[in-house]
Amino acid sequence: MSVSLIVLAAGKGTRMNSDLPKVLHRLGAAPLLHHALQAGQTLDPDQIVVIAGHGAAAVEKAARAFDNSVEVVLQAEQLGTGHAVAQAASLLAGATGDAIVLYGDTPFVRSETLQAMLDARVHNAVVVLGFEAADPGRYGRLITSGDTLERIVEFKDASDAERAVTLCNSGVICADISVLFDLVSRVGNANASGEYYLTDIIEIARAQGLSAGVVRCDEDETLGINTRAELSMAEAAFQARMRAEAMENGVTLTDPATTYFALDTVIGRDTTIGPNVVFGPRVTIESDAEIKAFCHLEGCHISRGASVGPFARLRPGAELAEDVHVGNFVEIKNAVLDEGVKVGHLTYLGDAHVGEHTNIGAGTITCNYDGVNKHHTEIGPRVFIGSNTMLVAPVRVGRDAMTGSGSVITADVPAEAVAIGRARQVNKPGLAVKLFDMYKSVREKRQKEAQ
């Protein structure tokens, strides 16, 4: 059975006190919206429709960054969840199968839960995701009769008896696409808020003789983000889950509490992660690697057997082959390091390719930016780059070559050659003592004048 996703992401999020749309606030180094999209994408949907409103252009950009095939439609007026879903009708016209309605500010719904809803659709026209709330508060209540869902009542419209019910509505709904839009078209706004509630489709469906059911999940899955405090708590919950999953998958975390993951972090088994390591987006680490303490990684790929850190920074485009060593206070950006390369310390490699088994001496810099454009540095295999070498790009260093320490390399270096680019040292006998005496005399004179 095919499935389409409708993700509601139009809200402003007033309680966030922010100019940024609520669904674009970050959790695990990714917009909240991406969490909902990732959960739904595991179902291999035919179409994904995001309903945008406040900050629509930014929301659309973020949605397309996740998956360029995502379709975005504008809800110009926010008139309720039923009205929001209705905006997707034209984009899904003619589609078959089921639709699942998700929320861009509800990041923890699991893909297994969504699959359970699809499975339950076999026996029900509409399926709602519910949870038993420890403190039901102002959640909408699911009113059931046996295994049948009779209706959903919003808290502000509920009676005292209905408010006593602890089975609550997550807002996530699964239904046949044609049935969903037919029901939504019948929703009115005769309620305390004057809005078109998506939840009303249950009572409408029951009145038409259609069945409705409930799939239950843990309350933690339904956590919605409405405030900065809730975002902070969600971050803690997300990190705890990611740490547990990493260790379950065979990754050693030396100090789990200080390791911070992104939504899309991938780490192979038997890799060791030291304390205070932060992963930004798009990091993949293969098996049997080591990331030492106080490293920051983003947009990079690290191969088997490589070691990084401590105190290293890998930026987008950093590609480390097998058995590469990157040491302390090294920064790498948009650079490929082939097998066995060693970059021990105090180095910047940007816009470069380094051949296999090359050694990069301390203090080396690829001078890749001329103030307007970026330029490439090419270093061949088995090269020895002397300490404090400045490689002024564009420049090439051939295989098996060497640069002298302290050199500024502005021209290509042939294979097997030694390049030395520095001024000749000149010694002036006795001049140091004379200079020191002069400096002291000037200082003493200034001190007397100041008195």
Image: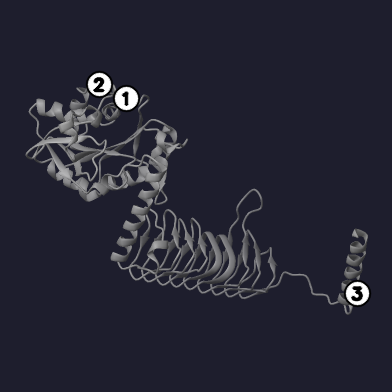
| Up/down of 281 relative to 288, above or below | above
Question: Badge 1 local density, few (<14 within 10 Å), some, or many (20+)?
Answer: some
Q: Which quadrant of the view contains residue 304?
A: bottom left
- Give the left or right position of residue 442, taking residue 251 as reference: right
Lower sequence index among marks 2 and 1 = 1
In space, the residues marked 1 and 3 are separated at their CA atoms by 84 Å
In space, the residues marked 2 and 1 are separated at their CA atoms by 9 Å
Q: Residue at x 66, y 69 (%)?
A: 388
In space, the residues marked 3 and 2 are separated at their CA atoms by 93 Å
Q: Secondary structure at mark 1?
A: loop
Residue that numbered label 2 is attached to: 189
**Residue 13 location, x and y as percent?**
39, 35
What amino acid is found at the position of numbered circle 2 in the picture? Asn
Residue that numbered label 1 is attached to: 79
Q: Give yes or no for contact between labels 3 and 2 (Cβ–Cβ under 8 Å).
A: no
Q: Secondary structure at mark 2?
A: loop
Lower sequence index among marks 1 and 3 = 1
Question: Badge 3 local density, few (<14 within 10 Å), some, or many (20+)?
Answer: few
Q: Secondary structure at mark 3?
A: helix
Residue 378 visible, this orientation: yes
**Residue 60 location, x and y as percent?**
40, 36
- Give the left or right position of residue 145, taking residue 347 as reference: left
Residue that numbered label 3 is attached to: 434
What amino acid is found at the position of numbered circle 3 in the picture? Lys
